[in-house]
Protein backbone atom coordinates (compact mmCIF):
# COMPACT_ATOMS: atom_id res chain seq x y z
CA UNK A 1 0.00 0.00 0.00
CA UNK A 2 1.73 3.14 -1.24
CA UNK A 3 -0.79 5.89 -0.61
CA UNK A 4 0.90 9.07 0.54
CA UNK A 5 2.70 10.60 -2.42
CA UNK A 6 3.01 14.36 -2.23
CA UNK A 7 2.95 16.61 -5.25
CA UNK A 8 5.47 19.41 -5.40
CA UNK A 9 2.74 22.01 -4.85
CA UNK A 10 1.86 21.26 -1.20
CA UNK A 11 2.65 24.86 -0.36
CA UNK A 12 0.20 26.08 -3.00
CA UNK A 13 -2.49 23.95 -1.35
CA UNK A 14 -1.89 25.51 2.07
CA UNK A 15 -1.74 29.02 0.61
CA UNK A 16 -5.16 28.53 -1.01
CA UNK A 17 -6.80 27.80 2.37
CA UNK A 18 -8.11 30.72 4.42
CA UNK A 19 -6.23 30.99 7.70
CA UNK A 20 -8.40 29.87 10.61
CA UNK A 21 -8.98 33.09 12.52
CA UNK A 22 -11.79 32.09 14.86
CA UNK A 23 -14.73 33.26 12.76
CA UNK A 24 -14.37 31.10 9.66
CA UNK A 25 -14.23 27.54 10.99
CA UNK A 26 -16.71 25.93 8.60
CA UNK A 27 -15.13 27.34 5.46
CA UNK A 28 -11.64 26.57 6.77
CA UNK A 29 -12.59 23.01 7.78
CA UNK A 30 -14.14 22.26 4.39
CA UNK A 31 -11.05 23.56 2.58
CA UNK A 32 -8.62 21.66 4.84
CA UNK A 33 -10.45 18.37 4.40
CA UNK A 34 -10.74 18.85 0.64
CA UNK A 35 -7.05 19.66 0.26
CA UNK A 36 -5.96 16.76 2.46
CA UNK A 37 -8.02 14.50 0.21
CA UNK A 38 -6.54 16.00 -2.97
CA UNK A 39 -3.05 15.53 -1.53
CA UNK A 40 -3.98 11.94 -0.59
CA UNK A 41 -3.13 12.66 3.05
CA UNK A 42 -6.53 11.82 4.51
CA UNK A 43 -5.84 8.17 5.42
CA UNK A 44 -5.39 9.17 9.07
CA UNK A 45 -9.00 10.44 9.00
CA UNK A 46 -10.42 7.42 7.20
CA UNK A 47 -9.10 4.59 9.33
CA UNK A 48 -8.12 4.27 12.96
CA UNK A 49 -4.47 4.07 13.87
CA UNK A 50 -3.15 0.59 13.09
CA UNK A 51 -1.92 -1.48 16.02
CA UNK A 52 1.72 -1.25 17.00
CA UNK A 53 4.13 -3.14 14.78
CA UNK A 54 5.57 -6.36 16.14
CA UNK A 55 7.70 -9.06 14.58
CA UNK A 56 4.53 -10.99 13.80
CA UNK A 57 2.98 -8.36 11.50
CA UNK A 58 2.77 -9.01 7.78
CA UNK A 59 4.52 -6.76 5.27
CA UNK A 60 1.12 -5.35 4.29
CA UNK A 61 0.35 -4.43 7.91
CA UNK A 62 3.80 -2.84 8.30
CA UNK A 63 3.28 -0.88 5.09
CA UNK A 64 -0.17 0.31 6.21
CA UNK A 65 1.24 1.42 9.56
CA UNK A 66 4.04 3.35 7.87
CA UNK A 67 1.67 5.06 5.41
CA UNK A 68 -0.83 5.88 8.18
CA UNK A 69 1.93 7.41 10.35
CA UNK A 70 3.10 9.58 7.46
CA UNK A 71 -0.47 10.65 6.64
CA UNK A 72 -1.11 11.50 10.28
CA UNK A 73 2.14 13.43 10.78
CA UNK A 74 1.80 15.45 7.56
CA UNK A 75 -1.89 16.13 8.19
CA UNK A 76 -1.11 17.66 11.58
CA UNK A 77 1.61 19.80 10.01
CA UNK A 78 -0.71 20.82 7.16
CA UNK A 79 -3.50 21.78 9.56
CA UNK A 80 -1.16 23.77 11.80
CA UNK A 81 0.15 25.71 8.78
CA UNK A 82 -3.39 27.03 8.16
CA UNK A 83 -4.16 28.26 11.68
CA UNK A 84 -3.42 31.74 12.99
CA UNK A 85 -0.55 31.70 15.49
CA UNK A 86 -2.64 33.05 18.37
CA UNK A 87 -5.12 30.19 17.87
CA UNK A 88 -2.49 27.44 17.74
CA UNK A 89 -1.64 28.08 21.37
CA UNK A 90 -5.21 27.47 22.61
CA UNK A 91 -5.76 24.15 20.80
CA UNK A 92 -4.78 21.11 22.88
CA UNK A 93 -1.88 19.30 21.23
CA UNK A 94 -2.26 15.66 20.28
CA UNK A 95 -0.41 13.15 18.15
CA UNK A 96 -3.57 12.29 16.18
CA UNK A 97 -4.62 14.47 13.23
CA UNK A 98 -8.21 13.30 13.58
CA UNK A 99 -8.30 14.23 17.28
CA UNK A 100 -6.53 17.53 16.60
CA UNK A 101 -9.19 18.51 14.06
CA UNK A 102 -11.91 17.44 16.51
CA UNK A 103 -10.35 19.67 19.21
CA UNK A 104 -10.42 22.60 16.79
CA UNK A 105 -14.03 21.86 15.84
CA UNK A 106 -15.15 21.77 19.47
CA UNK A 107 -13.45 25.11 20.07
CA UNK A 108 -14.98 26.92 17.09
CA UNK A 109 -18.47 25.46 16.56
CA UNK A 110 -19.78 28.10 18.99
CA UNK A 111 -18.43 30.88 16.76
CA UNK A 112 -20.24 29.30 13.81
CA UNK A 113 -23.54 29.42 15.71
CA UNK A 114 -23.21 33.18 16.12
CA UNK A 115 -22.43 33.47 12.42
CA UNK A 116 -25.71 31.67 11.63
CA UNK A 117 -27.58 34.39 13.52
CA UNK A 118 -25.79 37.09 11.57
CA UNK A 119 -26.52 35.37 8.25
CA UNK A 120 -30.18 34.97 9.24
CA UNK A 121 -30.43 38.67 10.12
CA UNK A 122 -28.79 39.63 6.82
CA UNK A 123 -31.12 37.43 4.78
CA UNK A 124 -34.29 38.60 6.51
CA UNK A 125 -33.43 42.28 6.07
CA UNK A 126 -32.11 42.20 2.48
CA UNK A 127 -34.12 44.36 0.12
CA UNK A 128 -33.83 44.78 -3.63
CA UNK A 129 -33.13 48.48 -4.07
CA UNK A 130 -32.20 48.55 -7.75
CA UNK A 131 -28.50 49.30 -7.18
CA UNK A 132 -27.64 45.91 -8.66
CA UNK A 133 -29.35 43.70 -11.18
CA UNK A 134 -32.16 41.38 -10.10
CA UNK A 135 -29.95 38.44 -11.00
CA UNK A 136 -27.19 39.70 -8.68
CA UNK A 137 -29.71 40.24 -5.88
CA UNK A 138 -31.08 36.69 -6.17
CA UNK A 139 -27.53 35.32 -6.38
CA UNK A 140 -26.55 37.25 -3.24
CA UNK A 141 -29.50 35.81 -1.32
CA UNK A 142 -28.72 32.32 -2.65
CA UNK A 143 -25.10 32.71 -1.50
CA UNK A 144 -26.31 33.53 2.03
CA UNK A 145 -28.27 30.28 2.07
CA UNK A 146 -25.24 28.38 0.71
CA UNK A 147 -23.24 29.66 3.70
CA UNK A 148 -25.93 28.23 6.00
CA UNK A 149 -25.48 24.84 4.34
CA UNK A 150 -21.75 24.99 5.02
CA UNK A 151 -22.65 25.59 8.68
CA UNK A 152 -24.87 22.50 8.68
CA UNK A 153 -28.28 24.14 8.20
CA UNK A 154 -30.45 23.02 5.33
CA UNK A 155 -32.81 25.63 3.94
CA UNK A 156 -35.81 24.59 1.88
CA UNK A 157 -35.90 26.26 -1.53
CA UNK A 158 -39.48 27.47 -1.01
CA UNK A 159 -38.25 29.28 2.11
CA UNK A 160 -35.56 31.03 0.06
CA UNK A 161 -38.02 31.92 -2.70
CA UNK A 162 -40.36 33.49 -0.14
CA UNK A 163 -37.50 35.60 1.23
CA UNK A 164 -36.62 36.69 -2.31
CA UNK A 165 -40.22 37.66 -3.02
CA UNK A 166 -40.44 39.55 0.29
CA UNK A 167 -37.27 41.47 -0.56
CA UNK A 168 -38.75 42.98 -3.73
CA UNK A 169 -39.90 46.55 -4.16
CA UNK A 170 -43.63 47.32 -4.08
CA UNK A 171 -43.66 47.58 -7.89
CA UNK A 172 -43.29 43.78 -7.92
CA UNK A 173 -46.52 43.34 -5.91
CA UNK A 174 -48.54 41.97 -8.87
CA UNK A 175 -45.75 39.50 -9.60
CA UNK A 176 -45.75 38.32 -5.98
CA UNK A 177 -49.52 37.82 -6.07
CA UNK A 178 -49.23 35.91 -9.35
CA UNK A 179 -46.50 33.67 -7.94
CA UNK A 180 -48.48 32.89 -4.80
CA UNK A 181 -51.58 31.92 -6.82
CA UNK A 182 -50.00 29.59 -9.37
CA UNK A 183 -50.25 25.86 -8.80
CA UNK A 184 -46.75 24.84 -9.97
CA UNK A 185 -44.23 26.96 -8.11
CA UNK A 186 -40.89 27.78 -9.73
CA UNK A 187 -37.45 27.01 -8.39
CA UNK A 188 -34.97 29.79 -7.59
CA UNK A 189 -33.41 29.82 -11.08
CA UNK A 190 -36.83 30.04 -12.76
CA UNK A 191 -37.87 32.79 -10.38
CA UNK A 192 -34.71 34.76 -11.15
CA UNK A 193 -35.27 34.46 -14.90
CA UNK A 194 -38.91 35.58 -14.53
CA UNK A 195 -37.84 38.66 -12.57
CA UNK A 196 -35.26 39.84 -15.11
Image (cartoon, rainbow, N blue to C red):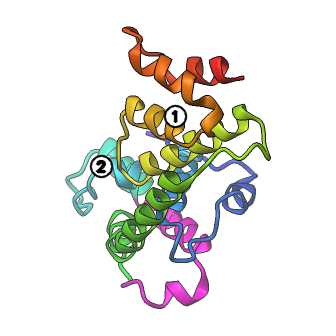
Does residue 42 appear in the picture of this structure? no
Report the predominant secondary structure element of the magenta stretch.
helix
Task: Work out whether residue 178 or residue 97 is closer to the camera in this orientation and state it.
Answer: 178
Q: Is residue 184 left or right of residue 175?
A: left
User: What residue occupies the far top of the structure in this picture?
Assistant: 183
178 lies left or right of 138: left
Q: Quadrant of residue 160?
A: top left
Q: Residues in magenta?
A: 69-92
| Identity of the residue drawn at 56% across and 43% down | 167
Q: Mark 1 Cα within 10 Å, few/some/many (few <14, many 20+)?
A: many
According to the picture, the residue beneath numbered tag 1 turns out to be 165
Q: Is 84 left, or right, of 52 in this rendering?
A: right
- In depth, the one of 16 and 161 nearer the eye is 161
Give the foreground label among 2 and 1: 1
| CA distance for labels 2 and 1 | 47 Å
In the rendered image, residue 140, in percent from the top left (x then y), is placed at 64, 44
Mark 2–mark 1 contact, CB under 8 Å? no
At 57% across and 17% down in the image, what residue appears? 190
Badge number at residue 47: 2
Along the polypeptide, which appears first: circle 2 or circle 1? 2
Amino acid sequence: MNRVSLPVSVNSHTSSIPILNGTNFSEWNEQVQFNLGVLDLDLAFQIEKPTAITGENSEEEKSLHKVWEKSNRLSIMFIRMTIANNIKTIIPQTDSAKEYLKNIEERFRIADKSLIGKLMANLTTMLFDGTCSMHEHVLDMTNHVAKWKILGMNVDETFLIQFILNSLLTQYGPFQIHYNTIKDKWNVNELASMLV
